[in-house]
Image (spheres, rainbow, N blue to C red):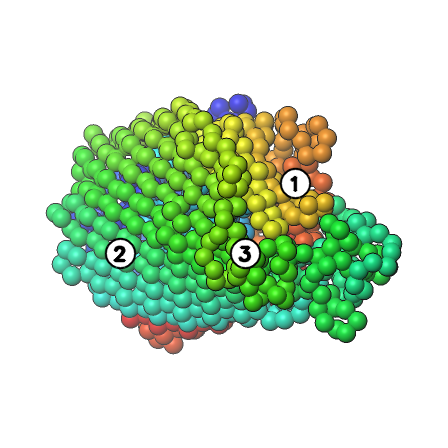
Amino acid sequence: MNKTLIVAALATAYPLAPVSCAWAQTATASASATAASAPTAAASTAASAASSQAGTPVPPLPASAPKEATLRGRSGPASPTSKDADQAADTPVKTLGMVTVRGSRPSSLPTNIPTTLESVTAQDIERTINATDSEDALKYFPSLLVRKRYIGDYNHAILSSRASGTGNSARSAVYADGILLSNYLGNGVGGLSFPPRWGLVTPEEIERVDVMYGPFSAAYAGNSVGAVVDFITRMPTKFEAHAKASYVLQPMRLYGTDENEHAWQTSASVGSRSGDLSWWINVHHTDSLGQPLTFATRLKSAGTPGTAGTPVTGAVPGANTANQPWLVLGSGTQYTTRQDHLKIKLAYELTPTVRASYLLGVWQNDSDGNARSYLKDATGAPVYSGPIRIEGLQYTGSQALTGGDFAVTREDLMHVMQGVSVLSHGGGEWDWGVSASQYDYRRDRKRQNAASNPQPAALAGGPGTLADGSGTGWTTLSARGIWRPSAQHTVEVGVQQDRYQLRYRTLSIAGNFLTDEAGTLASSVQGRTRLQSVYAQDAWDLADRWRAVLGLRAEHWTASDGRTDFSGTSSQSYASRRVNDLSPKAALSWQWLPQTVLKASVGRAVRMPTVSELYGATSTTNSQYINDPNLRPEKSWTGELSAETTVGAWSSRLTFFAEDTRDSLYSQTTFDVTANKNISRVQNVDHIATKGLEATVSANDWGLQGLDLSGSVTYADSRIKRNQGFVTTPGDTVGKWQPNIPRWRATAVASYRFDAHWTATLAGRYSGRQYRTLNNADVNGFTYQGVSKYATLDARVLYRFNKQWSAAVGVDNLNNYQFWNFHNYPQRSYTAELRFDL
């Protein structure tokens, strides 16, 4: 283990397990929710956020009490008129790196751990972010990036963090009110796609977002190695109603595409509390036309001089990621997306200190994926199939156009999430809780034309496939107890079980792939994994200025029922597997000066292989995924040292972090020129080491009443130290940069409240050079399938007509920077919205 990690002592006091339904925790006893760590304002969206949440657990405010203040360090008051009261309530009081915060909604993240935690509030999001999806709330957090490509992006929006890139979705943990949204059925987007289920939270229902960096809580599985995100959503204390309508316009100019993309969104919420019963209903609709995300290409070197094929014009010359000359022939994967979301939450006080809660979330997605050829024949008609000839070079045989170059897809999905909990919240010597959640792919069907069925005929039907993931999903169970023998000492224990089931069949359709029922079996993958865990952690104040936390997590993992059907007559079954492992944690904080705290944390994380990585071999017209049933668990030691301080109006944090990972699980996608498709395969990388620095700074009302500033800068050195595998030649990955981890990244937010009506915000994000491949051969990042640096600016202006009505306009990517992460990110986009709150 890297010696820099030994200096710390880590891990968590966590009042409720990850599936605890935090929205149900609003207690009936009056008290303060205690939040961790220092006045370090987050360089998150709003300009600052409560950095690190910790402290002795105490009961939250009564459900009927008004919310007095949001988390410390945010970018300003909830509204200009409440500014003085908010600032008084939010005065930072540092004690062992903890900041006590009075608020009506506790987080489900640890409340006793002296480590880095950043937050953003609903008020921050409304004032400073053009938020169309829930993941937009994370836009300006230090060291975080969500690979969101278009409004409603449900299959590629993966979260990356300090030492985890956008290809590693299984290295972060995302929750909503303590219910798991991360999709640990797989990792990344090879074959199938496994980003968090962002669509089950809408921006309008968010009350706060908390982020803990690193695997420093024994209550979380090893997937928390990158970051843990918890969306805390609204639960009313009196009758309230909300409505919002918004529109986004994106002029799109790339290769041979020149058009305007757009999106409409509407949402409505209503809720109340009557006696012991609280309820909340939220509905949301999105109708989005995104930009094209894939492009049909041919290497110039793949063409041969000759006269065969249809002479065509319109191909756009360029270079691939290796700087080899190629031709862009057309665009694809342009989604027309229609999404609907329904959320119902119920909570009932069984006794003054025990609450029962239920949550139902339904998400529906209908997407049409279309493609367009840039090529035209002598008559001006578009060309979609067959041998072609471009400027004397003929593309025939395997290089001729097929239905895979300009794929047509139609998707019909309905996913259902449920959660139930019974939790005590007395805040006395003992508290306890039991909870469960289920995520069900109730309907998950994707239709696609066959390679032999090109456009334009494919738009009316013809041969194709139906991929059906219905029956896939996961369940979680947990029970936990909290013992507080004294005000300075808290002991927590818990047991958990998470079960994952993958069922994915691809069936051939000989007639009309758009409407016909499934035909013969083309392929099928299935399997199960189960993770059973017990944990314990002990937090105590060693002295007036010292706090220590120790934790241990024990896990038993099994994989079973693995099977791959390559056709209706060929299949392979896999033997069951099991792994037992331990993950110790420790943390220490020292109140060095009245306004300065030093903190150290260290933790081990074991990330088990997912069902898809083990068994999920899939193949479509234009892609293929190769699984490995013998993958080893990924094992990481992560540590950080932080100094947090406040000087006048300024709050700052400096954190040194390091991560040492063995058997890192990686999926890599490469384009096979001969097969004319993207091929992904999963593997273990022997040893990756990362070390870096993260700095944040923020100030409220700095130099000018109403001016809030925040910023963050992160440097990371992340390299492959050892790897028996290779891309093209043995040893070609050793010493290379870990994919999708830039050396430098930064955020900056400036927000000014002119008066009680007007607020304006200018924000920026920067990410330096990075690579997508393990051997760093993709030297050209500014092209399709490349990963480029970027520097973008966003702007937003909010106007409040009165307490009920408000309107906002904004521009994302104001400088119209064209950047890539395999797919192209959105270009300059204009936003307008109207909102009503009662």
Q: Earlier in the sequence, mark 1 or mark 2?
A: 2
Look at label 3 and name its amino acid. Answer: Ala
- Return the x and y of residue 512 as percentages of the image width and height: 52, 61
Residue under label 2, please give it: 345
Residue bearing the label numbered 1: 773
Q: Who comes first in sequence, dot 3 or dot 1?
A: 3
Mark 3: which secondary structure?
loop
Q: What is the spatial separation of the Cα atoms under label 3 and label 1, in whole angstroms?
A: 37 Å
**675 vs 127: above or below:** above
Q: Is residue 92 left or right of residue 270?
A: right
Residue under the image location 35 percent in, 47 percent down: 439
Q: Is residue 284 visible?
A: yes
In the image: residue 566, left or right of residue 479: right
Q: Residue at x 59, y 44 (%)?
A: 624
Whole-percent x, y for residue 43 in the image: 49, 51
Tell me the quarter of the picture where residue 490 sits.
Answer: top left
What residue would you read off at disc 3?
510
Question: Which residue is located at x 29 percent, y 71 percent?
Answer: 838
